[in-house]
Amino acid sequence: MKGDILQGMAPNAKRSFAVSVAFAAVGAALYFLAVEPTESKLVVERRRLAGLEDRQRQINFDLKNADTVKEKLDGLEKSLSPYREAMLEPLLGSYSMRAKAKLEHLLLEAGLVNLDYAEEPFRALPLPKPVMPRQLHRRAAIRVTARGSYQAAVSFLLRLERELPLVSLQSMEITAEQNPARQAVAFVLEWPAKGGLTRK
Amino acid sequence: MNSSAFHLNLLKSSELLSSSPVRMRVMLPLFLLLGCAGMVVWWGVLFTQFMAVKARSDGISGDISAKDKSHAEIIERQAHARELSLQLEQLDYYRGGVRKVGEPLAALADVMPLKVQLTRLEIQPPPLQVLQPPGAKQPLPGPVENVETQKVVVVGKTTKETPVLALMESLEDEQFGRLVTRKREVKSFKQDDAPAKGGARLLAFEIEYTMPERRFAK
């Protein structure tokens, strides 16, 4: 059929047809091998450029605000410093030993004797929302038992509140004995302490 | 000689249908050639744009690489600041829940009626935290509630009821606000089993007060 059409054509028309087919092939080749790939690459490169520009803008913004971050860090460190000083850390692996080191002079000055220290179950602190810190903190509890008068027990609490303001009274029991100067006194005191990690 | 008399019709019947005076066999290759030229120009424009965009990208990339180290330090500082801020928030909750009752306990001695002898004064421990609610696969890292309620138990002996009433009235004073609320319950008020000195019969009482809430919040 095709052969019939070409055979019926004048030689000029045949040449024109052949040239047209050749140009069409060159045009298609140019589109598929040059234009289209270059256009795709351009789209990708523009997207990369947009990403890089965003990143550069962010970096410039962050660098410009480096001083603000430093000031914020200094402020946070300052705010955290009273907590760090108050934090109960184990002494030779024992929290009660550390509590003893911190409390003994206050208890003795208040007039309490027969002192004993023991760890109580630690309690968790509520979590900030919606993001948790990596380092959690908890309430370390130490039971202190002693003998002394009601006045001595109260005197100890007043000294404690003045000298260790971040130590809290969790529970307390004063039980009367025959000798009012040697009543049974028990306090459970709480400190802020480091807890577990939420992530590595 | 007049050539008009001699006429050869060289057009084919299909060519007669064309409205253009220029024949299709000339037009078609010409248009296709122009199309090819257009393709080359289009590619040229795209390639120039591509090179310009690439040059700009490479420039920015180089700039970013140069600032990378100092930026990484800032990012680290920002992350550290975020972490410290969260830690501070949790520790502020702790501070919010610090209970101080030294002053009201000191004042208690001043308002204690002469005819009342306390045998036990107890601030009861808070209820246990529920960190493993039913259905939870893992224990929670923190309590669901940020409030704890506790009770103060006052146990003592007296000769008659009026001194106890006076004590209860005194405890309603503002200075005891950090120790007790007005919510109280007389758990018992009865004849004491153990005889006192001189054979006198005393009355034993136990009053339970609700303490102000311990709120772990900023």
Image (tube, rainbow, N blue to C red):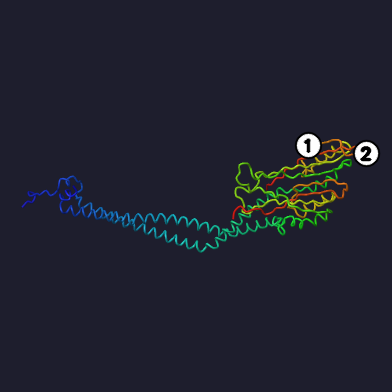
Q: Which corner quadrant holds the C terminus of chain A?
A: bottom right
Q: Residue at x 14, y 47 (%)?
A: B12
Q: Residue at x 86, y 40 (%)?
A: B157
Q: Is residue A40 above or below residue B16?
A: below
Three-letter code for the amino acid on which mark 1 is drawn: Glu
Three-letter code for the amino acid on which mark 2 is drawn: Gly
Write down the chain letter for disc 1.
B
**Mark 1 vs mark 2: same chain?**
yes
Q: Quadrant of residue A61?
A: bottom right
Pointer 2 residue: B199
Crowding near pointer 1: few (<14 within 10 Å), some, many (20+)? few
> Which of these two is toward me, B164 or A10?
B164
Write down the chain letter for disc 2.
B
> Which of these two is toward me, A175 or B100?
A175
Pointer 1 residue: B185
Q: Secondary structure at mark 2?
A: helix
Which mark lies nearer to you, 1 or 2? Answer: 2
x then y, percent, for residue A194: 67, 54
> Which of these two is toward me, B136 or A67?
B136
Q: Secondary structure at mark 1?
A: strand
x then y, percent, for residue B19: 20, 46
| In-image side of A49 versus A118 (left or right) | left
Q: Is residue B155 above or below residue A41?
A: above
Q: How many numbered dots are placed on residues in this image?
A: 2
